[in-house]
Amino acid sequence: MLLAILLDIAYAVMGAGIGAGLVAIGAGLGIGKIGASAMEGMARQPEASGKIQGAMLIIAALIEVAALFGLVICLLISFKA
Amino acid sequence: MTVFFNTLSRFSRVFSSVLLILLLSFPALAQQESSKDMDTHETSSEEKFDAGEVIIHHVLDDHIWHFFDGHGGTLYLPVIVYSEEKGLDIFSSARFYDEHHNLVPYEGYTLEHNHIYLNGKQVFDLSITKNVAMLLINATLMVIVFLSVARAYKRNSGKAPKGLQSLIEPVIIFVRDEVVKPNIGHGYEKYMPYLLTLFFFILFGNILGLLPGAANLTGNIAVTFTLAFISFLVTNFSGNKAYWSHIFWTPGVPLPLRIVILPVEILGIFTKPISLMVRLFVAITAGHIVILSLIALTFIFQSYLVGIASSVVVLFINLIELLVAGIQAYVFTLFTSLYIGMATTDHDHH
């Protein structure tokens, strides 16, 4: 009985940990893609690099927030368990 | 960038330098507190440092404002409760704590998990909590800054701006020309007061939340809910016929599909402000949790080397958080003006 409860908690915390890792991968992939196309755009047209940099930062912040959604849920799970 | 710095007025140079130094000295304060805190923890009780609880406690709202341990380090904010049995009661939250900082009940009221209960039931809680006090400080700061800028404009009308004007004017021009005008187009002046207030409230709130000892104002879901709700009201009350007809009876689409699109569009009216609310809340709260977790590393490992390393890392994360503060204010205002623009546009008829 106690083993079952402890096992449940263990699974929950393990799920939270794996989830946090996946969230980081997702954010990294997304921002990496943005960075790659921003670099390419800046290489093709150096005059537009200011505008491209500005747009890149804003989109990176949006993707980051999506990643943080998942992170907050993982934190909630690990604190409640 | 130093050339830009030299062109600012002397006041702006001094102001921005002081602000930068205050913000960057935040990690150093963590070092000081760590040695003091560790001594009291180990001599008074054998409690292990519970990082999760400390972090959550710093991010949530509270009835007291705790600056540092020791005499005079806590600001006991007023508690204002209304209940049918006892009517309106106003007293200092210090009544809920005894000398050893344990919670005690006071005249039938008990404080548990940040909620006040009267004989087991919740009361109508209008207290000045940490976040309410922070909100009032933010509002006062905004009033002071913008009234002085407006006065300066009246005094210097026709002349070049100087002092605080030179700091605020480019930001206002940026919001007007890059955010509001492209998205709302014709008739944008009506919405400028609200959107400027929104932008500067979120910007000041975010930056104030990064100062040491400050409350997590824009990371409170109730505050962001209110901002998103007001944006929701402004958007929908300025919606014109084209906007509502597009939602309820989408033109240019076959009839069976319109029935399917109808609930989706109605849901879409609500998901837009909900996304505004959650985006700002998560960005700011998660940023604070990251900073607090890195500082908590020092306490978990209880080593000076980890303390120094974590302070350096926290310094850089704080700079990222400054960037996030500005970006989240910009994004909230951008999306609000986008939604207002979508609601008020004279759509080309199909």
Image (cartoon, rainbow, N blue to C red):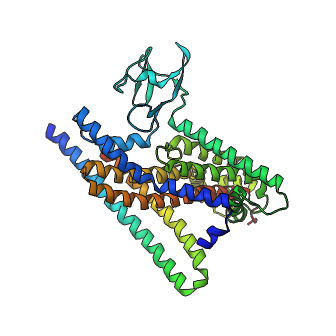
Report how many numbered discs are placed on residues in the image.
0
* Residue sitting at x 50%, y 36%: B130
* Residue sitting at x 44%, y 74%: A33
- Nearest the viewer among A15 and B27 is B27
Q: Is residue B233 above or below residue A71?
A: above
Quadrant (top left, top right, bottom left, bottom right) of the C terminus of chain A: top left
* Residue sitting at x 54%, y 82%: A42
Quadrant (top left, top right, bottom left, bottom right) of the N terminus of chain A: top left
- Nearest the viewer among B21 and A55 is B21
* Residue sitting at x 76%, y 58%: B188
| Left or right: B72 as drawn, with respect to B269 | left
Q: Quadrant of residue B54?
A: top left
- Nearest the viewer among B103 and B235 is B103
Q: Quadrant of residue B114?
A: top left
Horizontal and vertical percent position of residue B28: 40, 53
* Residue B266 appears in view: no
Horizontal and vertical percent position of residue B16: 59, 58
Horizontal and vertical percent position of residue B66: 44, 36
| Left or right: B111 as drawn, with respect to B336 | left
| Residue sitting at the far right | B158
Horizontal and vertical percent position of residue A11: 23, 49
* Residue B232 appears in view: yes
Q: Is residue B124 above or below residue B158?
A: above
| Left or right: A78 as drawn, with respect to B278 | left
